[in-house]
Image (cartoon, rainbow, N blue to C red):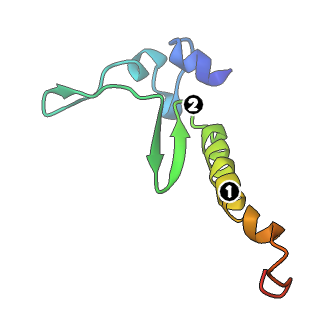
């Protein structure tokens, strides 16, 4: 809820910065940076609210893919349990 208030300019943000200031565009060398919904930082996906739901879902998806690639090995009758 506090994030929504900050985003709407109704509450002070981090370090008591007014909410209106957080909505100002960021410029670097005269070029305005565009906002993004999510980005990857050090291998983790960060969303616009600072949450990790997207990152957790992506990691679960990657683990599922890796596990499914090994499915034939797990189900193989030709390979012994020691090799598996």
Report the front residue among 80 and 56.
Answer: 80
Where residue 16 appears, as percent x and y from the top left, is 50, 28
On the rendered image, what quadrant is the N terminus found in? top right
| Label of residue 72 in the image | none
Residue positioned 61% across, 38% down in the render: 54
Where residue 47 appears, as percent x and y from the top left, is 54, 35
Looking at the picture, does residue 9 appear above or below residue 2?
A: above
Label 2: element kind? loop
Residue positioned 48% across, 18% down in the render: 19
> What residue did someone put label 1 on?
63
> Residue pushed farthest left?
29
Residue positioned 85% across, 75% down in the render: 77
Q: How many marks?
A: 2
Where residue 64 appears, as percent x and y from the top left, is 70, 53
Q: Of the two numbered discs 1 and 2 on the same chain, state the one appearing first in sequence.
A: 2
> What residue did someone put label 2 on?
49
Looking at the picture, does residue 79 appear above or below residue 47?
A: below
In the rendered structure, the answer to whether residue 58 lies left or right of residue 80 reads left
On the rendered image, what quadrant is the C terminus found in? bottom right
Mark 1 or mark 2, whichever is nearer to me: 1
Whether residues under marks 1 and 2 lie with C-beta atoms below 8 angstroms apart, the answer is no
Mark 1 closeness class: few <14, some 14–19, many ≥20 residues within 10 Å = few
Label 1: element kind? helix
């Amino acid at each position: 809820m506090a994030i929504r208030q900050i985003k709407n300019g109704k509450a002070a943000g981090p370090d008591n910065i007014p909410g209106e200031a957080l909505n100002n565009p960021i410029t670097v060398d005269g070029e305005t940076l565009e906002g993004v919904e999510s980005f990857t930082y050090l291998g983790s996906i960060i969303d616009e609210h600072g949450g990790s739901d997207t990152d957790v879902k992506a990691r679960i998806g990657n683990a599922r893919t890796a596990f499914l690639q090994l499915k034939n090995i797990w189900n193989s009758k030709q390979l012994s349990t020691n090799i598996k």
